[in-house]
Amino acid sequence: MAAALLLLILVNFVNICSGTRKLSSLYQPPLPLLSYHKGPLLQGDIPISILWYGKFTPSQKSIISDFLLSLTPQPTQHPISSSTPPSVAKWWSTIDYLVQKAGKAKTHIALANQVTDEHCSIGKLLKKSQLTELALKANALSSGVALVLTATDIAVEGFCESACGTHGSIAGPGPAYVWVGNSATQCPGQCAWPFHQPLYGPQSPPLGAPNGDVGVDGMVINVAKLLAGAVTNPFGDGYFQGDAGGHVEVGSACTGVYGKGAYPGYPGELLLDSSSGGSYNAEGINGRKYLVPAMFDPATSSCSPVV
């Protein structure tokens, strides 16, 4: 009898401990708060000046240009609300919320000018320090952003190894810049996922690129998250989580999350374009469809995908 009682106690103890371990493994602590650190933000009219460094086709240029023009609602669009269909402008509304919460003017994104350096005037093997030199070639206005886009055969220090792009500023608090590389032939599994099989982890089949270009559709994802960071944290003292120097920004807090139910290796529930077979979560101008990363929602301290 005593032996049976002891066995029952041991079984219950194991069950309790097992349940505790299971619950602990499922627990995911909330993301740290996204805080405004009182520094300057980009606001109001924000002209984007593009430097196309290397060879880009007219189709590739139009995919990215249309994305940028889709950030600000067009006059023919209905005002953005909770019932508005998923759009690039609706996705960008989180940035406007943060900018206006800080007492700044709502953004208006426009294309200022585009410069093409097809012959790669400073070479095809670049150091990080040369990105500001390229940004200067875009002739950006002081209130805008220089967007530097490098072609598939341009190698930039750190590209693929640690980053798919970056943002910073020219000569301190001058024009902000964003750099993104085309990873189609260098590291599509890292910088163009989920349109290419991932470099590591579960090897699920890649999704169809909504505009039929794995490299450029991947660039759109990175342009989106880095432009969001450039507007809300242009000089390192705007919106970010954590400590200065190792902070996470609004566009990078939800890496790999594109739709509801996302988890590592699975981008989430997305929309499917029946005509092209491409996966997307936001619509843009000229019938364009894009995949944009989930934004960090400061109201819930969680990742909020547009679909």
Image (spheres, rainbow, N blue to C red):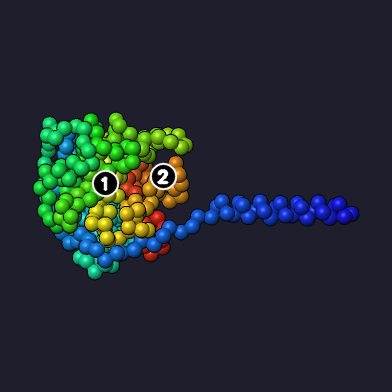
For the residues bearing labels 2 and 1, Cβ distance under 8 angstroms: no
Residue in view at x 21 percent, y 56 percent: 72
Q: Is residue 68 left or right of residue 271?
A: left
Q: Amino acid at mark 1?
A: Thr
> Is there any visible trace of residue 70 in the rendered image?
no
Q: Residues within 10 Å of mark 1 (few under 14, many from 20)?
A: many
Q: Indicate the position of residue 231 as horizontal and vertical percent values.
A: 23, 56
How far apart are labels 2 and 1 at the CA level? 22 Å
Which amino acid does the dot numbered 2 rest on? Pro
Q: As rendered, which of 35 and 193 lies closer to the eye?
A: 35
* Residue 146 versus residue 277 in the image, above or below: below
What is the count of numbered marks?
A: 2
Q: Residue at x 49, y 57 (%)?
A: 29
Does 199 sit left or right of 174 as displayed?
right
For residue 94, which quarter of the picture? bottom left
18 lies above or below 272: below
- Residue 267 disc label: 2
Q: Which mark is residue 36?
A: none
Q: Is residue 56 above or below residue 169?
A: above
Mark 2 crowd level (few <14, some 14–19, many ≥20, 10 Å Cα): many
Can the viewer see residue 2? yes
- The extreme bottom residue here reads 103
Q: Give the image location of residue 289, x and y in percent.
A: 28, 44
Q: Position of residue 79 (x, y in %)?
A: 25, 61
Residue 188 location, quadrant:
top left
Q: Residue at x 40, y 55 (%)?
A: 303
Q: Which mark is residue 166?
A: 1
